């Protein structure tokens, strides 16, 4: 490996030894960049990579809130403004009990390259809290969100930092956060948050956008192989907005998602999540707060596998769409043994590095990385920002058309970048290189600081 690259990776491993998710994503991205670094000695001269792997700023704050029984609780909140070289920081807020600085940094680093791939003027950021929304009442979640925004509002704005939703933060939470921001600022700056309700500045198809975009990317991959999506079977994980969007768009195009998963296990529906009743039930499951995929099995009479993951099911396409590190080497070997040809990452870093490398080495298996595949969500968030700034509301057809074009462009950028550096049809390396190059060029052009 290039000596400069190796030294940066080793530096990150040493400095962030207690943040394994961050180390993992930095190592995966930087390893792909070797041919670029070899051809650009100016990057080493200004130590560009060590600058790029450190957030521009990251702050921590306490969040105090009162439960319905009158007891007070204190959680920790974070916001990481990772890189603003190509636009205002942009990235979601995640509310989950496992959130800690390493998760926020890993997501912010990934977000920087994902946002770059969209071609839109948005930098990378991420935030969240170790607050667990599960089992909380609406009023408790509202009070938490209001307290969270009281600490955050000074550091965000339409041209500074634009948060959005993520795991544990949906339209309800965004509404509470925005309401508090508006009261604190005394202004209707609806471009400060995305993922808003349509009644106060949200964009049509935003909830479905990540899933829709993933399917549009998949279509490009299939077209490259001379295949069509119609008739394909797909294994997904989770049952949130992303998987819901995949199910909707796949069904429209004649494919079927046959697995869903949750903390309690996974379901297998051989007929697919294809009918309106089934697709709408995912929304009901999500809003119930139960967080149990078994509910689907009980309602529709399909197989439920408690405590298991769906990656042993024989399908045409695997689209891990739930959470980071969901697919380890054991599951990767199952996927390969089942003859799965298309492994399309959708969740942020859903595959461990060793499992991803294993799958990429399997003859006939095509792997696409999440930072490219799931960029449709943030792309549509940027389209929401554009509508807010112009005081316009675009139709569903207009938003969907732009999303489709952006995903086609992301795919082609990844293909072109890999070919430019002699890597063949390597979508993982291509996405890393294409995303990196735009950020690097912007950082170099703006001077060393």
Image (cartoon, grey):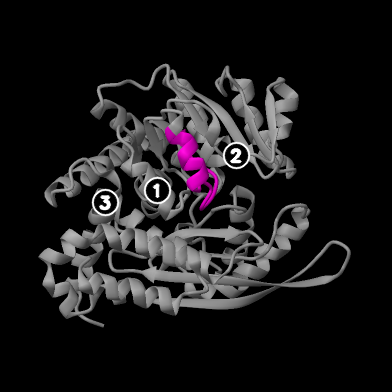
Residue 435 visible in rendering: yes
Q: Is residue 353 left or right of residue 167?
A: left
Residue underneath mark 3: 429
Q: Are marks 1 and 3 in contact (CB under 8 Å)?
A: no
Of the pair 109 and 67, the residue shown nearer to us = 109
What whole-number distance in Å separates the C-alpha atoms at marks 1 and 2? 17 Å
The image shows residue 313, relative to residue 157, as above or below, that is above
Task: Say few, some or many: other residues with alpha carbon within 10 Å of mark 2 (under 14 / 14 to 19 / 20 or more).
Answer: many
Please tell me which residue is depicted at 41% across the width and 45% down the height of the picture.
374
Quadrant position of residue 87: bottom left
What whole-number distance in Å separates the C-alpha atoms at marks 1 and 3? 12 Å
Query: What segment is highlighted magenta in the picture?
Result: 318-336
Q: Depth-wise, is mark 1 or mark 3 nearer the camera?
A: 1
Position in image of residue 143 (x %, y %): 72, 64
Q: Earlier in the sequence, mark 1 or mark 3?
A: 1
Disc marking residue 290: none
| Secondary structure under the numbered disc 1 in the rendered image | helix
What whole-number distance in Å separates the C-alpha atoms at marks 3 and 2? 27 Å
Q: Are marks 1 and 2 in contact (CB under 8 Å)?
A: no
Q: Are marks 3 and 2 in contact (CB under 8 Å)?
A: no
Residue underneath mark 1: 356
The image shows residue 84, relative to residue 232, as above or below, that is below
Residue 379 visible in rendering: no
Task: Let me know if residue 35 is in the magenta part.
Answer: no
Disc marking residue 309: 2
Task: Let me know if residue 330 is in the magenta part.
Answer: yes
Task: Say few, some or many: other residues with alpha carbon within 10 Å of mark 3 (under 14 / 14 to 19 / 20 or more).
Answer: many
Please tell me which residue is depicted at 64% across the width and 59% down the height of the picture.
96
| Secondary structure under the numbered disc 3 in the rendered image | helix
Of the pair 221 and 38, the residue shown nearer to us = 38
Please tell me which residue is depicted at 30% across the width and 56% down the height of the picture.
116
């Amino acid at each position: 490996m290039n000596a400069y690259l190796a030294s940066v990776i080793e530096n990150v491993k040493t400095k962030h030894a207690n943040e394994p998710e961050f180390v993992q994503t930095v190592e995966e991205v930087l390893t792909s960049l070797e041919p670029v670094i070899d051809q650009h000695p100016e990057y080493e001269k200004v130590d560009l990579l060590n600058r790029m792997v450190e957030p521009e700023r990251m702050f921590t704050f306490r969040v105090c809130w009162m439960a319905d029984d009158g007891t007070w609780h204190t959680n920790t909140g974070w916001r990481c403004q990772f890189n603003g070289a190509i636009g205002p920081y942009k990235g979601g807020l995640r509310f989950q009990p496992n959130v800690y600085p390493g998760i926020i940094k890993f997501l912010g680093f990934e977000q920087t390259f994902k946002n770059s791939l969209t071609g839109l003027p948005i930098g990378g950021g991420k935030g969240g809290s170790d607050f667990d929304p599960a089992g909380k009442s609406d009023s408790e979640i509202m009070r938490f969100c209001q307290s969270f925004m009281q600490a955050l509002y000074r550091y965000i704005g339409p041209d500074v930092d634009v948060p959005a939703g993520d795991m544990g933060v949906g339209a309800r939470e965004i509404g509470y956060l925005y309401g508090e921001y508006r009261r604190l600022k005394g202004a209707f700056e609806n471009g400060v948050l995305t993922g808003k309700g349509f009644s106060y500045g949200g964009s049509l198809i935003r909830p479905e956008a990540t899933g829709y975009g993933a399917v549009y990317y998949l279509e490009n991959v299939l077209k490259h192989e001379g295949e069509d999506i119609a008739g394909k079977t797909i294994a997904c994980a989770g049952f949130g907005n992303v998987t819901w969007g995949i199910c909707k768009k796949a069904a429209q195009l004649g494919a079927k998602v046959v697995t869903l998963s949750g903390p309690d296990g996974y379901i297998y529906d051989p007929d697919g999540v294809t009918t309106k009743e089934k697709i709408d039930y995912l929304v009901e499951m999500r809003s119930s707060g139960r967080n149990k995929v078994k509910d689907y099995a009980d309602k529709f009479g399909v197989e439920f596998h408690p405590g298991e993951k769906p990656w042993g099911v024989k399908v045409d396409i695997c689209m891990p769409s739930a959470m980071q590190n969901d697919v380890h080497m054991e599951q990767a070997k199952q996927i390969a043994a089942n003859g799965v040809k298309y492994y399309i990452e959708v969740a942020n870093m859903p595959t461990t590095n060793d499992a991803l490398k294993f799958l990429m080495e399997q003859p006939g298996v095509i792997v696409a990385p999440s930072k490219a595949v799931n960029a449709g969500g943030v792309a549509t968030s940027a389209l929401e920002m554009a509508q807010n700034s112009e005081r316009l509301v675009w139709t569903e057809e207009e938003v969907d058309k732009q999303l489709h074009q952006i995903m086609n462009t992301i795919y082609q950028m990844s293909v072109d970048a890999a070919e430019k550096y002699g890597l063949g049809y390597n979508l993982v390396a291509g996405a890393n290189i294409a995303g990196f190059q735009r950020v690097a060029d912007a950082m170099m052009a703006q001077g060393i600081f």
